[in-house]
Amino acid sequence: MRQILYIAHGGGPMPLLAQDDSHDSLNNALRDIAARMPTPDAIVVVSAHWEADIPHVTTAQQPELIYDYYGFPPESYQISYPAPGEPGLAKELLGAITAAGIESVGEPERGFDHGLFVPLKLMFPQANIPCVQLSLMNTLDAEAHIRLGNALTHLDYDNLLILGSGFSFHNMKAFFAQGDTGADRKNAEFQQWLEYVCSSGALTEQQRSEKLSHWHEAPHARFCHPREEHLLPLHVCYGAAGRACDEVISVSALHKEARMCYWQLT
């Protein structure tokens, strides 16, 4: 069995800070879906916070954490999530990507960034599921990331979760402009478009792939994503699934509407 999940991971460490309530909807949704899904034996995380010229894969047995955020309270830099790496899975992942004709490289020194440890601390707080992190490509080419996801279909690993960690809305200025109804309207139209594209049975897979490849043509796409790194983990997830998602989950984080998508493959 294979599960694939595209999530919103929220603003930096804020989902884990007790004084923040703008992530309650997101936190509850992450905990709920983790409780409902079969527990995976390993997790591959595609994080919006790692870009490289070609796909990079963490290969360490026990990666450290990277506190890749700034200006937060001291406790934000004391967060612990000692999940192990999985070098065997990393080798399989690199092999699958290479077999698809995509150059890739192992990264033995890099740790886990907050796109991994923040949501997984909510979903699987025991930190006992081995994790491997996969980078985006810094071309930010949507079609290339769908092809990267296609490569993951050849992974020979049972009971795997592929987690795309991003945010389906990522306009930093708009996050801090509460009460801007124009921004909320634009976001709502984009989220509705995204939900339709990811879940509709009326689309062929060629149509779905083309729409995701040309996501910038969607309503208010560049308002919602001035830079697309937080959307592209979805493209990897879709490429790995190859079909409409089984469930769309609506959440709110930082007072903005977002969508998460879940696939369960046998």
Image: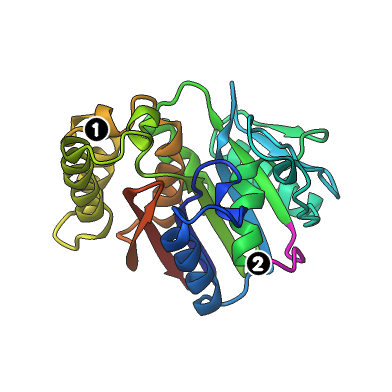
Q: Where is residue 20 in the image (x, y as percent from the top left)?
A: 53, 52
**At 82% across and 43% down in the image, what residue appears?**
64
Please indicate, yes or no, whether residue 155 appears anywhere in the rendered image: no
Q: Name the residue under label 2.
A: 124
Please indicate, yes or no, whether residue 74 appears anywhere in the rendered image: yes
**At 82% across and 33% down in the image, what residue appears?**
109
Q: Name the residue under label 1.
A: 221
In the structure shown, which secondary structural element does the residue marked by tag 2 occupy?
A: loop
Q: Quadrant of the N terminus?
A: bottom right
Residue 127 among those drawn in magenta: yes
* Residue 217 falls in image quadrant: top left
- Asked if the residue under mark 1 is in contact with the one under mark 2, i.e. CB atoms within 8 Å, the reply is no
**In this view of the protein, which residue sits in the foreground, 199 or 241?**
199
Q: Where is residue 122 in the image (x, y as percent from the top left)?
A: 61, 63
Query: Hey, what amino acid is under mark 1?
Result: Ala
Q: What stretch is highlighted in magenta?
A: 124-130
* Residue 63 falls in image quadrant: top right
Residue 100 sits above or below residue 196 on the image: above
**In this view of the protein, which residue sits in the foreground, 193 or 258?**
258
Left of 180 or right of it: where is 37?
A: right
Mark 2 closeness class: few <14, some 14–19, many ≥20 residues within 10 Å: some
Q: Position of residue 176 (x, y in %)?
A: 38, 34
**At 20% across and 47% down in the image, what residue appears?**
188
**In this view of the protein, which residue sits in the foreground, 126 or 39?**
126
**At 64% across and 37% down in the image, what residue appears?**
72
Residue at the right extreme? 61
